[in-house]
Amino acid sequence: MDPITLILTALTAGATDSIKDATSEAVKDGYNGLKALIQRKFSDNADATTVLEKYEKKPEIWKAPLADELAQSRADQDQEIITKAQRLMAIIQPEQAAIGKFNIRFSNSRGVVIGENNQVTNNFGDELKEN
């Protein structure tokens, strides 16, 4: 699943589940946390903030505009947003998360790390030459 689709899926699922009375506090907190991160990302863009608000009410109509705003703001490259979306989906759909449905695939990326407590060494530029 690509990052934009993950974020949109998490927002839709969180908004839908968060309006139910029986929704757990974990879902509500996860959704509100994800939404707050995106709002912060959009803080300098009133149009993007409006699109996010409208998406909550009519996701089928505002999906493409929100996807565009997420891409323009590079939310799809924001580690914190992606991790929050993954965690929310793992709470809402634990069976799907267990089989890797919400894993992110990057192509032609450099320095991307998803998860916690990772140790990474990146070497950019010329390849190391053996003596």
Image (cartoon, rainbow, N blue to C red):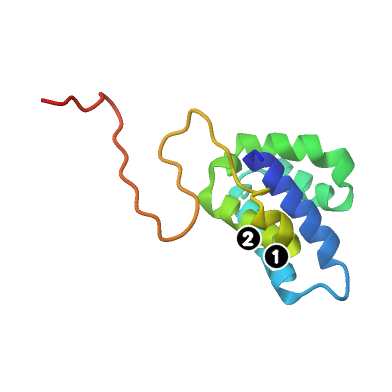
Q: Residue 67: x, y in percent?
A: 72, 37
Dot 2 alpha-carbon crowd within 10 angstroms: few under 14, some 14 to 19, many 20 or more: many
Task: State whether residue 113 appears in this view.
Answer: yes
CB contact under 8 Å: marks 1 and 2? yes
* Three-letter amino acid code of the residue under disc 2: Arg
**Amino acid tagged 1:** Ile
Determine whether the residue tagged by mark 1 lies in a helix, strand or loop.
helix
Question: Measured along the vertical axis of the image, is residue 99 above or below residue 5?
Answer: below
Residue at x 46%, y 59% (from the top left corner): 116
Q: Is residue 32 above or below residue 66?
A: below
Estimate the x, y position of residue 91 in percent, counting from the top left: 70, 65
Distance CA(mark 1)–CA(mark 2): 6 Å
Q: Could you say which disc has been placed on residue 87 in the image?
A: 2
Residue 57 in picture, x, y percent from top left: 88, 52
Give the answer, above or below, for where 77 lies relative to 11: above
The structure residue drawn at horizontal position 63% and vertical position 42%, both measured from the top left corner, is 3
Classify mark 2: helix, strand or loop: helix
Crowdedness near tag 1: few (<14), some (14–19) or many (≥20) residues, C-alpha within 10 Å: some
Residue 39 falls left or right of residue 53 = left
Q: Is residue 116 left or right of residue 84?
A: left
Identify whether 29 is placed above or below 44: below
Residue at the extreme left of the image, as rendered: 131
Classify residue 30 as left or right of residue 107.
Answer: right
Residue tagged 1: 91
Image quadrant where residue 30 sits:
bottom right
